[in-house]
Image (spheres, rainbow, N blue to C red):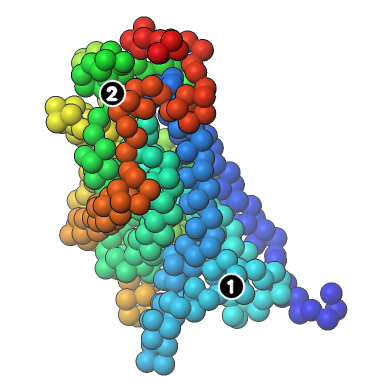
C-alpha cells in the first residue's frame, strides 16, 4: 500500500453514501425487471410463458454486456466533450471517453482511491453508473420483447437486442444528462424516458406491422379460437413490484452537491428529494384512479393496468420540475391518451398493446406537457462552468426542443427497426411461422406442454 498513491478525497464517507445511493438505484432497476417478467407471464398464452421468459432474460443480459463493453463510454462522452476547445476538439474528447470507459479502459478498471481526483473526480460513482445504466439498457430489450413476443425468432430478437443496446446508448448521449447534444439546446428528460421508453416504442411501430397479429388475437384461428390471457393477478402483482422498485431509481436520477445533500436532477434542474418522490407517487395515483374509471365505464380490464403505468410514464420526463398537485392533474389525464391510442391499435388490428399506447402515446404527451408547463425553467450545463452552452443552468426547457427530442427518439427506433427488418429476413429469418405460434413455442423449442388447457385452445397433444 505504501508504494501506491492513495487519494483519500475519492473514498470519503460522503462519497460512500453517494455510492450506496446509486447502488440502491441499481437494485430498484432490477426489481423493475422482475416486475416486467411477471407482467408478461400473466399476460401471454400459457403455451409461451417459459420461452418468452427465457428470451427476455437472454435479451436483458445481451443489453447489459453491450453496455459494459462500449455503451457507457458513449453516454459518458458528453462529460468529456464539455471540455472541448481549440486544442481539444469534440471528436478527440469523444474518443478519450471511449478509450477510458469501454470495458478495457483504464478508468473503467481503476481503483478509485488510486486515481487523482484532479484527473477524474468521483470515479466510484461513474463506475457504479455503468451497472446502473447497463440494467436500463437491458430493460430496453425486455420492453422491446413485449412488442415481438411469440412472433419473432429468437435469433432475430437477440441480434436486435445487441443493435438496440448500441443505438440506445448513443441516443442517451444526446438526450439524458446535463450536457448532451439535445439537452443543452433545451430538451428535458429527468428519467431517461427518451431512450428507455420512446426508442423501443419506435421499434415496436415497425416490428408490430411486419410481424402481424398473433393467432387468435383479432380473429379465430383453427388451433386458437381466442387469445386467452392466463393470469391477470400475476400481471397486477408485477405492476406493484415495479411501483416498489422505482423510488430507488428516482434517487439515482439526482446529483448531490455541497452543502452536503443539495439535490439537483441529472439535468441540473433545481429540485429536492421530497418533491421528486411525491411527484412519482401522485403520478401513479392519478393514473390509477382515471384508469379505474375508464375500466369500469368500458368494462375493459386493460385500463386497470394501463392506468397507473400511464400516469407514471406521463410524469417520468419531469419528476424533478413538477409540483405534486400539477403532477397529479397531468397524470390523471394520461390514461385518456393511452385509451385513445390503445383503441386505435385495436381498430387497425395492430397487435401491440403496451409500448405503442404507453410509450409512443403517453410518453410523448408527458414530454410535451413538461414543455408546455415549464418552458423557461433553468437547467442544463455543469457545475463550475459559468459561460457558454455548458454553463451551469445556462439553458432553459423549450417546448420546441421537447417535440424535437420526441421525434429524434422515436425516429431512432423506427429507423433502427426499418434497417434491421430486411437484414434479419435474409439472414436469421424474422418471423415464427403461424403454425408454430399456434402450437406454442414452449413445445416447439423445448418440448414443454402446458399443465392446463385453456378452453379457447383445444389440446394438440394428439395432433
- Going 29% across and 65% down the picture, which residue do you hit? 182
Badge number at residue 59: none
Which of pointers 2 and 1 lies earlier in the amino acid sequence?
A: 1
Kind of element beneath mark 2: loop
Q: Residue furthest front?
A: 463
User: Is any atom of residue 136 visible in this view?
Assistant: no
Pick the quarter of the image with the N terminus: bottom right
Q: Quadrant of residue 390?
A: bottom left
- Going 47% across and 21% down the picture, which residue do you hit? 234
For the residue pair 404 and 247, the one nearer the viewer reads as 404
CA separation, marks 2 and 1? Answer: 48 Å
Q: Position of residue 142 (x, y in %)?
A: 43, 41
User: Is any atom of residue 100 visible in this view?
Assistant: yes
Within 10 Å of disc 2 (Cα), the crowding (few <14, some 14-19, many 20+) is many
- Going 47% across and 24% down the picture, which residue do you hit? 443
Q: Residue furthest right?
A: 2
Which of pointers 2 and 1 indicates the residue nearer the eye? Answer: 2
Query: Is residue 13 shown above or below 352?
Result: below
Q: Position of residue 208 (x, y in %)?
A: 25, 38
Kind of element beneath mark 1: loop
Badge number at residue 215: 2
Identify the residue under disc 1. 105
Q: Position of residue 115 (x, y in %)?
A: 67, 76
Q: Is residue 294 left or right of residue 279?
A: left
Query: Is residue 340 shown above or below 415?
Result: above
Amino acid at each position: 500500500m505504501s508504494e501506491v498513491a492513495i487519494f483519500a478525497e475519492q473514498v470519503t464517507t460522503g462519497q460512500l453514501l453517494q455510492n450506496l445511493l446509486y447502488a440502491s438505484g441499481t437494485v430498484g432497476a432490477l426489481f423493475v425487471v422482475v416486475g416486467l417478467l411477471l407482467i408478461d407471464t400473466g399476460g401471454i398464452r400459457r403455451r409461451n410463458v417459459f420461452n418468452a421468459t427465457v428470451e427476455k432474460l437472454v435479451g436483458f443480459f445481451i443489453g447489459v454486456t453491450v453496455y459494459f463493453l462500449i455503451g457507457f463510454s458513449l453516454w459518458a462522452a458528453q462529460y468529456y466533450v464539455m471540455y472541448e476547445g481549440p486544442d481539444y476538439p469534440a471528436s478527440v474528447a469523444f474518443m478519450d471517453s471511449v478509450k477510458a470507459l469501454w470495458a478495457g479502459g483504464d478508468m473503467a478498471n481503476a481503483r478509485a482511491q488510486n486515481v487523482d481526483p484532479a484527473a477524474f473526480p468521483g470515479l466510484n460513482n461513474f463506475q457504479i453508473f455503468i451497472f446502473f445504466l447497463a440494467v436500463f439498457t437491458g430493460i430496453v430489450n425486455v420492453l422491446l420483447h413485449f412488442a415481438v413476443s411469440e412472433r419473432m425468432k429468437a435469433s432475430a430478437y437477440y441480434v436486435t437486442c445487441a443493435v438496440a443496446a448500441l443505438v440506445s446508448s448513443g441516443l442517451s448521449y444526446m438526450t439524458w444528462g446535463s450536457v448532451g447534444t439535445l439537452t443543452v439546446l433545451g430538451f428535458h428528460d429527468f428519467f431517461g424516458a427518451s431512450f428507455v421508453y420512446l426508442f423501443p416504442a419506435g421499434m415496436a411501430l415497425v416490428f408490430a406491422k411486419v410481424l402481424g397479429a398473433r393467432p387468435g388475437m383479432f380473429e379465430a384461428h383453427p388451433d386458437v379460437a381466442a387469445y386467452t390471457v392466463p393470469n391477470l393477478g400475476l400481471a397486477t402483482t408485477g405492476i406493484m413490484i415495479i411501483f416498489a422498485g422505482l423510488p430507488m431509481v428516482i434517487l439515482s436520477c439526482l446529483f448531490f452537491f455541497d452543502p452536503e445533500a443539495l439535490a439537483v436532477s441529472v439535468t441540473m434542474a433545481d429540485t429536492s428529494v421530497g418533491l421528486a418522490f411525491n411527484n412519482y407517487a401522485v403520478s401513479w395515483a392519478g393514473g390509477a384512479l382515471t384508469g379505474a374509471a375508464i375500466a369500469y365505464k368500458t368494462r375493459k380490464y386493460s385500463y386497470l393496468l394501463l392506468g397507473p403505468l400511464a400516469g407514471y410514464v406521463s410524469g417520468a420526463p419531469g419528476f424533478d420540475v413538477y409540483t405534486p398537485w400539477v403532477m397529479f392533474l397531468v397524470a390523471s389525464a394520461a390514461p385518456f391518451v393511452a385509451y385513445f391510442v390503445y383503441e386505435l391499435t385495436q381498430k387497425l388490428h395492430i397487435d401491440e398493446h403496451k409500448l405503442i399506447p404507453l410509450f409512443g402515446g403517453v410518453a410523448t404527451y408527458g414530454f410535451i406537457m413538461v414543455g408546455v408547463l415549464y418552458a423557461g425553467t433553468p437547467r442544463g450545463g455543469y457545475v463550475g462552468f459559468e459561460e457558454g452552452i455548458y454553463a451551469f443552468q445556462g439553458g432553459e426547457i423549450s417546448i420546441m426542443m421537447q417535440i424535437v427530442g420526441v421525434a429524434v427518439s422515436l425516429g431512432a427506433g423506427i429507423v433502427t427497426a426499418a434497417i434491421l427488418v430486411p437484414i434479419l429476413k435474409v439472414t436469421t429469418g424474422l418471423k415464427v411461422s403461424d403454425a408454430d405460434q399456434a402450437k406454442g413455442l414452449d413445445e416447439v423449442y423445448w418440448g414443454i406442454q402446458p399443465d392446463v388447457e385453456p378452453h379457447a385452445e383445444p389440446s394438440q397433444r394428439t395432433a
